[in-house]
Amino acid sequence: MSFLRPLGLSLLASLSLLASAADPRLGQTWLDHAKQDLLPWWTHVGAQGEPIGRFPTFRCNDGSAYRSEAPCPELADPPAWIKPELGRQYVRMQSRQIYAYAMGFHLTGDIKLLQLAEAGVRDLRQRALDHRSGSAASWFENGKPKPAIGLRTSQDLSYAALGLASVYYLTRDAQVLADLIRLKQHIFNTYQDKKTGLIKWVAKDDGSGEAEREELVATLDQLNAYLILVTPALPEGPLKQRWQNDIAQLSKAMIARFHDPATGQFWGTRGAADRESAEGRHNDYGHTIKAYWMLYLGAQQNQDAALAEFAREGMRKVLAQAWLADTGSWGEKRLADGSSSNRKSWWIYAELSQAAATLAMLEGDDAERWHDASQWWLAHFVDRQHGEVWGSLPANGQSDGRQLKQHHWKNGFHSMEHALIGYLSAQTLAKQASRLYFAQPPSRKAPALRPYLFDATVLKVQQQRLGQRNIQQVDFQIMPQRNIEKATAAQ
């Protein structure tokens, strides 16, 4: 698979010529961003692993895999929070890379990307999944799965499910679904607090204090990593109903424990006063907007109008707080004085843009913030030389080339989802169909297909045969929520 040089500068130039978010050319700009800026990084030989599918956790900024015997300069003397992790291969990062390939195929129809996603799934299922308990390893160290079952964080388990979820969504592979169900059952049976409905951080107390941690992401990432994506794709029946009920229960529990009505934000952690401050762990715009976004999407699936309204208004407030009008970009978090930090984190920026795009696409909100933020993203985050996006940037948006693009918390999940949401939103705002690709077996009863996390009308399905695979090229029309409500009221 060739490594094509990204053409990000031409993409930026084309975006800057688009007068508004409804320009019919904007969808192609997002497709080009995925094809030319992101996918070359993931199709690089250094990304594919040894054997292929066992994707490396750390890579150098030129795309090559990290080698401890001859480390590249950026990993030879890394920050203290990275240094002790270099000997580990994280399952959550392998799973996020599976997602990147899966959604790359979803956007482009390139069968080689689906093959890489499935290679990653095979390796994950063979090595990382414990078929007796249903658990998944968090990382491998010297070839051994770590840590012990019960000491693995529920967040790590949720992201182990992400790769399985994305491949099942595309292929409806029954074996992949069986492993995903076992993993999900393990999480809920072992980690869920029956009194509160929340998911605990770890299931066992080893004396470290980890069992007492109250983490928003322990619950939130069950929604984010697999429940919201997979539930609509499940066959009708008790299993689907149970997953829908789980979405509703987690949503309710998350609001009860982590939402702060006074500020409108979701606290990243609870249990100590100093955690409810500007400097508290995970008290940023990213975790708050992601919580509202998941609540909104889950409420739509469950037809919960009150929860959808709560989440919709919450997103609007966060987006207003996070917007930096002087630079046409998003801030990172709210500071103690009420202002917004003007530093940038790639995943927080992406989450804010995705929420803004969703509201513009479905609710008719003004799309200009999203359009301007997209220009800033392409102008500053993209590495023009080697592809992908920088992990963090200072206020001026100028990378010094030392910020890592892949490590034990950064992979292709957020950047590829950002491109996918960008494409779907641009097409919808321009009143154009969105074209996506699936790889599902032929069936007498066509399965319900939807464009990622959104409801839509299927306009056209074109079947293709590529080798031994059935590929579906599907054109969707996403209908804004306000139009759905009008149509429903008229019936």
Image: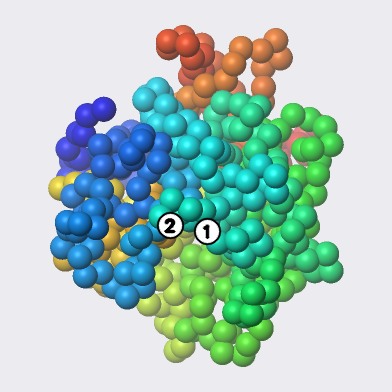
Q: Earlier in the sequence, mark 1 or mark 2?
A: 2
**Could you tell me the amino acid type at mark 1?**
Lys
Q: Which mark is residue 141?
A: 2
Q: Which mark is residue 298?
A: none
**Numbered-mark total:** 2
Looking at numbered disc 2 in the image, what kind of residue is underneath it?
Glu
Q: CA distance from mark 1 to mark 2?
A: 7 Å
Question: Which residue is drawn at the image coordinates 20% and 57% (left, top)?
Answer: 69
Q: Which residue is mark 1?
A: 146
Residue 353 left/right relative to 58: right
Residue 209, image x, y percentages: 62, 80
What is the crowding at mark 2: few (fewer than 14 residues within 10 Å), some, or many (at least 20)? some
Whether label 1 touches label 2, CB < 8 Å: yes
Q: Horizontal and vertical percent for residue 88?
A: 40, 58
Disc 2 is placed on an element classified as strand
Q: Is residue 372 visible?
A: no
| Residue 289 in view, yes or no | yes
Q: Tell me the quadrant of the picture where the N terminus can be found.
A: top left
Q: Is residue 3 above or below residue 394?
A: above
- Quarter holding the C terminus is top right
SS assignment at label 1: strand
